[in-house]
Each structure stands twice: as C-alpha cells, then as structure tokens.
Image: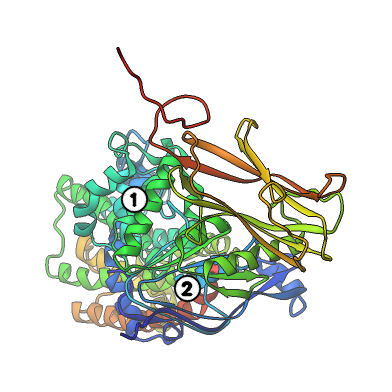
Amino acid sequence: MMSTNAISLEGVTKTFRIYKEQFRTIKERALHLGRIPFSEFDAIHDISFDVPEGSMTGILGHNGSGKSTLLKCIAGTLTPTSGEISVRGRMAALLELGAGFHPELTGRENLYLAGSILGLTKLEVESRLSSIVEFAELEDFIDTQMKHYSSGMFARLGFALAANIEPEVLLIDEVLAVGDEAFQLKCLDQIRRFNESGVTMLFVTHDVDLASSICDELIVLDHGRIISQGSPREAAIDYRKSLHARNDSTEPHSTSPTEEVSIVSVSLESEDRPVMTVRSDEPIGINVIATLTKPISDLVVAYAIKTIEGAVVHSSNTKLLNVDLSGVGSELDLTFVFENLPLLEGMYEIDIGAHSLDGSTLYTQANEVKRFTLTNSSVGAGIADLAVRAQLK
Amino acid sequence: MIEKQKTSQKSRKSVDNRSIRKIFSYRELLFNLTKTELQLRYKNSVLGFIWSLLNPLLYLVVFSLVFQEILRTSIPMFAIFLLSGLLIWNFFSSSLNSGTGAIIGNASIVKKIWFPREVLPLASVGASAIHFFLQACVLVLALLIFQHEPNWAAISLLPLALLVVIVLASAGAITLSALNVYYRDIQHFLEISLLAWFWLTPIVYNYNLVADRLGSSDWVAMLNPITPVVLAFQKALHNPPAGYLPDVSLWQYFQNLAIVLSVGLILLWGSLRLFHRLDSQLADKI
C-alpha cells in the first residue's frame, strides 16, 4: 500500500532580519528612515523533507541549528519566507508545555482555555478532564491557581492535555526536558502509544540517544541546513561528527593526550538499535566509533563500566579480548558485546580509552562518556546481581 | 476542531470569508478568552466586579457636580443624560484601549501556538461588551429611582446602535492590536486621542449646543461616527424635551446609524485585510 505523507516540506526558508537596534517608536523610525542597519540570516535554508503518515521522525540539531524555527513554521506560528509546507490531518503542536496556561487561573480553568486554543470545544475538554488530571497526577491541585504550581506540575498538566487531544499529527519540541524521571518515562510511554496507534510525530530534540531510540528516521540540522537524513544509527553518527567538528561540545568529553585517535561516539545498542535504558537480562553492546589520523599498529581500546559513585564494576580491552586493531584504517567501528549485565538496578557510566599495547602511550581517554539506566527486577543491595536463594534447614 | 484537512501556509495569504470562517470556528476560544479577561480583572479583589460599577458612579458624581452646580447646565435629569452617553462611550474606548495591547499582552501564546490571532482583540471587545451590560444595570437602576420614562419607540434604535459600536470597536481593536506590535507608540497615542475624542462627542454636553453654533454646516458634527450612536442612546433613554437633541424623526436617527454601520463594515473588512497582511510577521516582531 502506498503511504501518503502527513507532513511535506518543499524548499522552506525562513529569513530573519537582525536589526542592530530595535526601532519601535515612530520617532526612532523617522530618524532612521530607510537606513536602519540590519543584516539578514537564514534560520533555516531550503529545507525539504516528507514525513510519511504514522511514522515518527526526529529532528536533531545543536542549539541554534534552526530546529525550533522549523517546527514553528510547520505549526504555523511563523510564516516561512519562501517554500511550501503542507500538513494533512488534525495537528497539535507541543511547542512548549504549558504554553497558553495563565498563572492566575486554576488548573481546571486553564485546561478549558488552553484546550480551546488547541481547538477543542468545551464538551471535548469536559469529557477528557478526568483522564487529563489523572495522567498529570494533579487530582489534589486542579482547583489551585497555577501560580502556585511547580514547574514540573506545569509541564505535567501541559503534557497531559496534549496527550489527551488525540491528534493525527503531533509536533513535539524538547518536551521531555522537564519533569522528573518517572514522569519522563510516562511521557515516553505515551509517545510510544501514539506511535502504535498511527499518530504521525515530528520530534525535535538535541538528545541524540532519546531520538535514535524512539524515531524511525532522523534528520540532522546544522546551521539551518539538513546535513544528514536517514536511519537513526547513521544519522546519529553524523550528528555526533558535526558536534565534534564544532568542538564546542562536551559530548563526548575526551582528553586526547595525543591527537592520533578521537572518539566520535559511544552508544549502547540492543539488536542494532541505540537504547538508553538497559535490561540486565538482555544482550547489550557498547559501540565505539572513532577516527584515526593514521593506522596504529599497537592500538588497544579499553572500556570500564562504573557505578555513578565511580567504583569500577567491570573493565576490559581489545587486547584481553583478543581483537587485533592494527588493520583498522581511518575509521574505527567497534562493539563490545555482552550476553547480559548481571548488575543491580541503577545508573552506570562508561569510560572509553585507547592506548598502545604496552600502555606507554595514551591515545585518548574519555571518562564518563556515557551514562545509562539499568533495570533489573532482582532485589538486593550492592552492585552485582548474584544468583542467590535462602535455604532453611 | 484542530486544523482539519490539508492546511497550506500559502492558502492563508488570501483574505476572504475563509478567515472569517476560521475566526468563527474558534468562537469557543473567543468566548474563553473573554471570560479569562473578566476573571483576571477581578481575581484577588474583594469587591470584584463592583469596581466596574463604581467607575460610572464616580463619573456621575464628578460631572454632575461640575456641570450642574458650577456650570449650571440646562439639561434636565443630567445624571441620566450623562449615563446614557457615557456608558456606550466607555464600551467603545475600553475596547480600543485593551484591544490595542491584546497581542503584545499574549505574546507567550502568539509565539507558540497557531490560532487566528484576530480572536485576541475581539476578546477585548467581548470583555468590554460584558462590562457595558453590567454598567447598564446602574443606568436602569437610575431610571427606576428617578422614575424617568424612556422613549419606548426610540428604544428600537438601540440594538442597531449597539451593533454599530461593536463593529467600529472590532475594526479599531483589530487594526490597533496589529499596528501596536510594530509601533509601540500606538498605545500612548491612543490615550490622548481618546481623551480628545471623548470631548468631541456630545456626552457631557448636548448635541444642539454645538450644532446650533455650526449652523448650516452642522453635518461636520456628524463626521464623528460615535455621535449618532450616543444620540440614539440619549434619545431612547433620556428623551429630553425638544431643543436638546436633533429634532428629526426616528427614521432619520435610524438612517444615520445605518450609514455609520456601512462605513463600519467597510472599516472592519479593511482591518481584517490589514491584520492578514501583518499577521505573518507578528510572531517575528513581537
């Protein structure tokens, strides 16, 4: 069956004029008539892509790459300077959670107001009210003025409203940056449910792990242009490379004593898909991508899994694992594969390093380059998940 | 309903009845924003909406003192005369005043969510309309207390007069709200203009006072579009003896209102066009 496109962009450009000063009053305008100094810049330039119905596309970009401008153009709050955008279906934009909420009004009053901004009728809000409040876990506060809400409560109510309006096309902008971990997981769950029920989603973020773990396709923006588009894995690598090239990023944070090896990305993979959370009983891979200035005959790559407090849980390297890296050319794509991770539930971190066979030369060292959450249903305290049972005689 | 069917950015560029239909489809929002504006005005105040009743009462006391006791106006039942014109003027001027800041005041929503932004200034007009009806209670009360008989036949003019004000206020609020994003001078300029406009409208003095001096060129006084409206209210509710208001048939009053209404509708159409032109840049400039 031919699938149609829910969102389609063709040659979309948004040009902003940057005035040296903002002349807002008529007097100032008259004084500077015709010669207000300004420069133009394209926040997004000649963007074309299609989002097929029911798919989930992520837009990755660092700060200032134009990803939010792009989303605002699709949502209709900004009008593109040139190009054509078409959206098919009932659209809802989550450009910022809680937009349209007024602090002086109560949560309930705000739901009616924000609901009608999103295009819902009073009856439609009424029928959803209890499920919205339940989702936001704000049963006790719904009749409190929102100025007394915490920022997390604000965001929860915003997401709960958006999650309950049953859109066909949903635009999501950095919404998961707020709220505690439990609520973030709940939001992710809801996003997955949307995905299963065929909602088309456009997801804007700079969190590459999150994006690549939930999206079908990724688009990478840099300075308003698409630099990569395709499967999450490849696009994520391109994104990391672009970050790396910018050199103003802290991710991955590597101190290179020598310049011969530089780590492009470190990610966790399960069945060839990047993941953020790991289950202790599942196979998991630590994937390292690095670039080499020249082939190194005595290269060894090492890893360490540490607890968040810094205790090393496990550590090994390619020498101990009998992998010869001397034949690697300019790009290294290496995965350490684990059958399982018998550790207790918690947060862990990964260090990656590269050194010479005898350990005398350190090529690169990246500490705490990757943090991940491990889930495990076993109980017990400590680090290791040992198979144990209590026996009474 | 949220954006139904195919929405194309380019299609929004043409102004026609589509934009009016769009506004109509967001009437629920218009209603809610109006409600919010009223709610916000009285949140955290003990006397609540009584404050908006005190405003015309204060005017009444001050103007009665000045015009009746000091200037010795000849208008009988000055309190009722004043309120007849003042309340409808308040409706008009407060619509423009709050409408001008409607878009800037809601910048946070305008920047983030798309909806027909015309709804914002229209909600200001809506809130002012509700106020007008609340304040009208004071007038009705005054009529009852003074046992003043209105001109029942002329009351039939009032729905039309009210419609004229709504159309004019909407046109003004829509235009000013958009222009104010570009030129913040608008709100200061408006304040002074409304003050001048108030004194140029026969509210605290009677129409014939001016018209008699103008003689044959008394049509000049009718250039003020609010004048026919105020006259209709004064005719209907105050109903002074001959010599104070234009002594023409009710039909003539009706015609004047009809002329202003047609002008108002053209202005409203023009204001929607202008808003549409400026709309695409609003979120950039705000």
Q: Residue at x 40, y 85 (%)?
A: B15
Q: Residue at x 42, y 86 (%)?
A: B11
Q: CA distance from mark 2 to mark 1?
A: 22 Å
Mark toward the start of the polypeptide (2 vs 1) = 2
Residue B236 falls left or right of residue B105: left
The x, y position of residue A73, in whole percent, is: 51, 73
Q: How many marks?
A: 2
Q: Which mark is residue A160?
A: 1
**Secondary structure state at the residue bearing disc 1:** helix
The x, y position of residue A122, in whole percent, is: 22, 58
Discs 2 and 1 lie in a common subunit:
yes
Report whether residue B220 is seen: no
Q: Residue at x 20, y 79 (%)?
A: B249
**Secondary structure state at the residue bearing disc 2:** helix
Q: Which chain hosts label 1?
A: A
Residue B212 falls left or right of residue A350: left
Residue B283 falls left or right of residue B251: right
Decide: is A217 above or below A120: below
Decide: is B236 above or below A284: below
Residue closest to the eye, B160 or A388: A388
Decide: is A314 above or below A318: above
**Residue underneath mark 2:** A74
